[in-house]
Image (tube, rainbow, N blue to C red):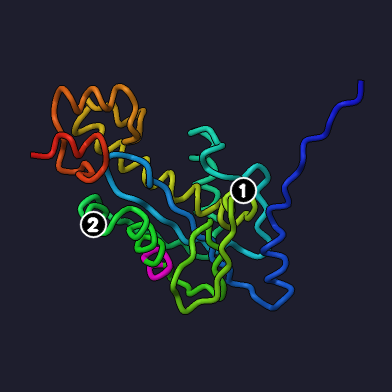
Amino acid sequence: MRKLKKEQIDNYQYERDLKRQGVSLIGGIDEVGRGPLIGPVVAACVILKEDFDLPGLTDSKKLSEKKREWFYDKIQENAIAIGIGIVGPEKIDEINIYEATKVAMKQAVASCPIKPEHLLIDAMKLDVSIPSTSIIKGDLKSITISAASVIAKVTRDRLMYEMDRKYPMYDFKHNKGYPTKKHVEAIEKYGILKEHRKTFSPVSKYVK
């Protein structure tokens, strides 16, 4: 019986196309944390070296925590520049999560110590002066966006571990702020925290 080959995604294609056009400083942008009930949305902008090659690097959601941490260290070692954007729950409640995500992405670009010549962005469109390409499922299709996905994910997870030490009853260590059964039950039992997103359901039910 003949084995079927898994379809291989060429996640260097966008980078190669840009390099053929003479673009070398390519900034990949992705965010993490649009769905949780608590904490910030975090975005990262990553510029990789031209010869960067890290087999297995993909969308952070498809990697184990151990793998993400390993890739995080490798990206930190091999990136030309990394910028981080963090927008907290108060701002999220004020302008909504979609707009807050764009703000975090713009912060990530602005905080990048080297200005990218072109941005590859996961799905979203940004109103920025730098030429950009929005890619649906970009965290799978672009190695640079995959790198940004890992940096953003590990950065946010570490913030949630700090929050877990302050409020262990909410189980943030495991749920990362997402609306799991244990998280929702903790809200019902202990109430909401100042870090909760007050406009998100079911948190909004407990806002006095």
Residue in the foreground of this view, choosing between 5 and 114: 5
Q: Which residue is mark 1?
A: 140
Residue in the foreground of this view, choosing between 7 and 148: 7
**Mark 2 vs 1, N-terminal side:** 2
What element does badge 2 sit on? helix
Residue sitting at 34 percent across and 27 percent down?
180
User: Where does the C terminus fall, quadrant-wise?
Assistant: top left
Residue in the foreground of this view, choosing between 109 and 136: 136
What element does badge 1 sit on? helix
Q: Which mark is residue 91?
A: 2
Q: Is residue 108 magenta?
A: yes
Relative side of 19 to 136, left or right: right
Measured from the top left, where is residue 47 in percent x and y? 54, 64
Relative side of 28 to 200, left or right: right
User: Where does the N terminus fall, quadrant-wise?
Assistant: top right
Q: Which residues are magenta?
A: 107-111
**Which amino acid type corresponds to the residue marked 1 in the rendered image?**
Leu
Residue in the foreground of this view, choosing between 52 and 30: 30
Measured from the top left, where is residue 20 in percent x and y? 74, 73
Q: Which mark is residue 112?
A: none
Residue sitting at 53 percent across and 57 percent down?
123
Label 2 Cα crowd, 10 Å radius (few <14 / some 14-19 / many 20+): some
Label 1 Cα crowd, 10 Å radius (few <14 / some 14-19 / many 20+): many
**Which amino acid type corresponds to the residue marked 2 in the rendered image?**
Lys
Q: Main secondary structure of the magenta part?
A: helix
Residue sitting at 20 percent across and 53 percent down?
90
Measured from the top left, where is residue 115 in percent x and y? 48, 75
